[in-house]
Amino acid sequence: MVQTSQITKTHAVPIIAVVALLALFGMGYFMVGFDQGQLFSIVQGHAAYTQMNGVGYLHEMTHDMRHASGFPCH
């Protein structure tokens, strides 16, 4: 009689990895929404757009990500 053993692997994602990725996603989404005032326009209205015009470098670094996440920019 031949005995065979079956090895099963579990592919569980560590909770700390999920939390770290969600935190990174949240910070990135905040940065993209912060640029040019889209995020704060919900509370401040049109004044948020004029206050955030000096952050042009942030817009250029996150330009494609803005379109992918649904924020308008031009």
Image: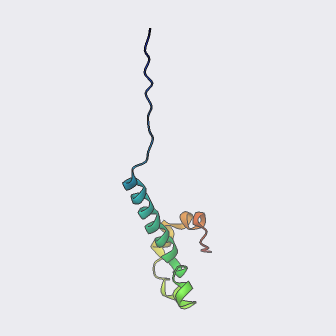
Residue drawn at (45%, 41%), measured in percent from left and top?
Answer: 11
Residue drawn 55% across the image and 79% down it: 38
Judge by depth and name the residue closer to the eye, 14 or 23: 14
Q: Which colour scheme is used?
A: rainbow
Residue 41 position within the rendered picture, expressed as x and y whole percent measured from the top left: 55, 85
Give the quadrant of residue 2.
Answer: top left
Residue 24 screen position, x and y as percent = 42, 62
The percent coordinates of residue 4 (x first, y second) are: 44, 17
Identify the residue at horizontal 43%, vertical 14% (top origin).
3
- Count of numbered badges drawn on the protein: 0
In the displayed orientation, state which residue is furthest to the top: 1
Q: Where is residue 47 in the image (x, y as percent from the top left)?
A: 53, 91
Quarter of the image with the N terminus is top left
> Which residue sits at x=39%, y=54%?
15
Q: In this view, does 20 lie to the left or right of 62?
A: left
Of the pair 6 and 26, the residue shown nearer to us: 6
Q: Is residue 7 above or below residue 48?
A: above
Question: Horizontally, is 1 left or right of 49 in the view?
Answer: left
Q: Quadrant of the C terminus?
A: bottom right
Q: Give above or below for 48 relative to 56.
A: below
Residue closest to the eye, 22 or 53: 22
* Residue occupying the far left of the picture: 16
